[in-house]
Image (cartoon, helix red, strand yellow):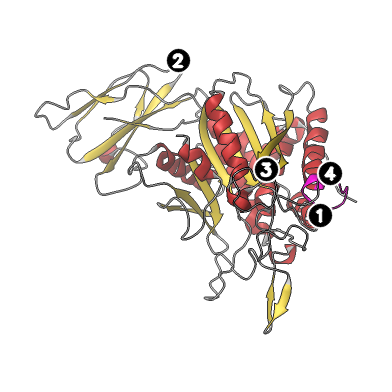
């Protein structure tokens, strides 16, 4: 029987917050939500997802126990249960089943048909911007066209689906200012078709997307071939096509920063590539539409697990089974997602028109200007020109806190890059805007 775990009421968050050590700059509500990620919940989701035999894009949509149709029913059922229990706590979560057509242009399809996926919206109290979380439903074996063979997909991408389910479970009871959308996409293994559909819809409908976090394989700790085991590092891939200070790079750095505050025992490793060699992910669909988008992925990849038929061959076990998922590692990665998403959902908008006002002057000082962000204070960031990450503070003990737009500092604009970000009254920093 499929298990749907109970909703965690808001009062429990407050108790958890009191029992958690509050790190400097940490919000007690976020600390409580991060602590609420439950390893037993995560295990149950993956066990249930594996029980559908295969979630292949072209698998059955009518069998109540097997195939992608049953998997989507399960995901929707979990979210609907939590949404019902969230009545009166925040704007009610909205669950939308989405159908799109595949196979019209050939590719990895042997027929034309409609395929299901799911969008769960957690509306913000202000709902000015949106943060998207992605994971893909579908699984595969060696033959990408095989839609019936057992394809458990515990890590690829049951781990990502577990992240989204825990996010919906926990955040259904937490009022956030900005909207969080969890997109359970299909068609990834056939060519990113489900995410391409959502990304095109986001562009056509003018969704105010601030950030896209795609979680694809976040539960494995072993590297096949080398035997390397790394259970305290996770990669964040961010594209390089538009330069060092692209919006996607700023998002990746932000995830690393929030992870260090709220999940200090898990290192976020910035990978300045769009993705791995000969592999791709659903974040790419959103990149093509111009959205800031990153992929969160395990540090080590086990090719004996992913895209394999379940079997034993020459003494080696193959297949993406739940027994190979490292659940404490997966829980930490889910917590990093929650920390980043919740901070973004409570942070102000990015400042606009950030400029080096004295850019044309021969001057060893730097004068920054920007448009005001209502209700926000500001933080000035800098880094030396050969560095990729913002410094934790301004050199020389200079204060980086600013109450009103405008900042003058005795640091040369020739030696540093500068950025400004808005900070909420509750201390939640937004994404930085680089001074030009």
Q: Is residue 132 visible?
A: no
- The relative height of residue 261 versus residue 427 in the rendered view (above or below) is below
> Magenta stretch: dominant SS?
loop
User: Is residue 65 found inside the magenta-colored segment of the image?
Assistant: yes
* Start-end of magenta stretch: 61-70
Q: Which mark is residue 52?
A: 1
Q: Is residue 206 visible?
A: yes
Which callout, 1 or 2, points to the residue nearer the camera? 1
Residue 124 percent location from the top left of the image: 63, 23
Which callout, 4 or 2, points to the residue nearer the camera? 4
Cα separation, mark 1 vs mark 3, equals 18 Å
The residue pinned by badge 3 equals: 164
SS at circle 2: loop
Cα separation, mark 4 vs mark 1, equals 15 Å
The residue pinned by badge 4 equals: 4
> 14 or 3, which is in the foreground?
3
SS at circle 3: helix
């Amino acid at each position: 029987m499929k298990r749907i775990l109970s909703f965690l009421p808001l009062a429990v968050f407050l108790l958890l917050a009191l029992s958690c050590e509050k790190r400097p700059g940490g919000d007690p509500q976020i600390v409580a939500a991060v602590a609420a990620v439950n390893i037993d919940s995560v295990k149950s989701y993956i066990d249930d997802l594996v029980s559908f035999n295969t979630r292949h894009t072209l698998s059955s949509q009518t069998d109540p126990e097997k195939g992608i149709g049953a998997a989507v029913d399960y995901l929707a059922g979990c979210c609907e249960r939590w949404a019902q229990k969230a009545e009166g706590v925040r704007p009610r979560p909205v669950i939308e089943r989405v159908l799109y057509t595949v196979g019209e242009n050939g590719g990895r399809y042997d027929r034309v048909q409609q395929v299901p996926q799911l969008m769960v919206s957690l509306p913000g109290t202000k709902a000015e911007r949106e943060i998207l979380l992605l994971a893909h439903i579908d699984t595969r074996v060696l033959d990408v066209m095989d839609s019936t063979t057992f394809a458990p997909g515990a890590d690829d991408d049951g781990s990502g689906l577990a992240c989204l389910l825990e996010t919906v479970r926990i955040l259904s009871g937490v009022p956030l200012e900005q909207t969080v959308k969890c997109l359970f996409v299909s068609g990834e293994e056939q060519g990113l078709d489900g995410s391409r559909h959502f990304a095109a819809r986001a562009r056509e409908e003018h969704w105010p997307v601030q950030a896209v976090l795609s979680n694809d394989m976040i539960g494995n700790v072993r590297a096949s071939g080398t035997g390397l085991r790394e259970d305290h590092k996770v990669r964040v891939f961010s594209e390089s096509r538009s330069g060092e200070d692209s919006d996607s790079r700023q998002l990746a750095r932000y995830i690393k920063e929030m992870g260090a505050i709220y999940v200090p025992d898990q290192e976020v490793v910035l990978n300045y590539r769009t993705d791995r060699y000969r592999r791709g992910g659903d974040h790419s669909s959103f990149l093509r539409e111009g959205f800031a988008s990153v992929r969160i992925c395990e540090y080590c990849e086990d090719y004996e697990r992913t895209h394999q038929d379940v079997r034993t061959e020459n003494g080696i076990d193959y297949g993406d089974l739940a027994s190979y998922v490292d659940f404490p590692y997966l829980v930490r990665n889910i917590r990093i997602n929650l920390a980043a998403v919740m901070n973004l959902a409570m942070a102000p908008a990015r400042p606009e028109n950030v400029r080096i006002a004295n850019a044309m002057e021969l001057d060893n000082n730097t004068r920054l200007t920007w448009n005001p962000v209502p209700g926000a204070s500001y933080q000035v960031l800098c880094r030396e020109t050969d560095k990729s990450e913002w410094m934790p503070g301004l050199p020389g003990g200079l204060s980086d806190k600013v109450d009103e737009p405008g900042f003058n500092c005795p640091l040369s604009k020739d030696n540093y890059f500068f950025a400004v970000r808005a900070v909420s009254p509750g201390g939640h920093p937004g994404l930085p805007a680089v001074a030009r």
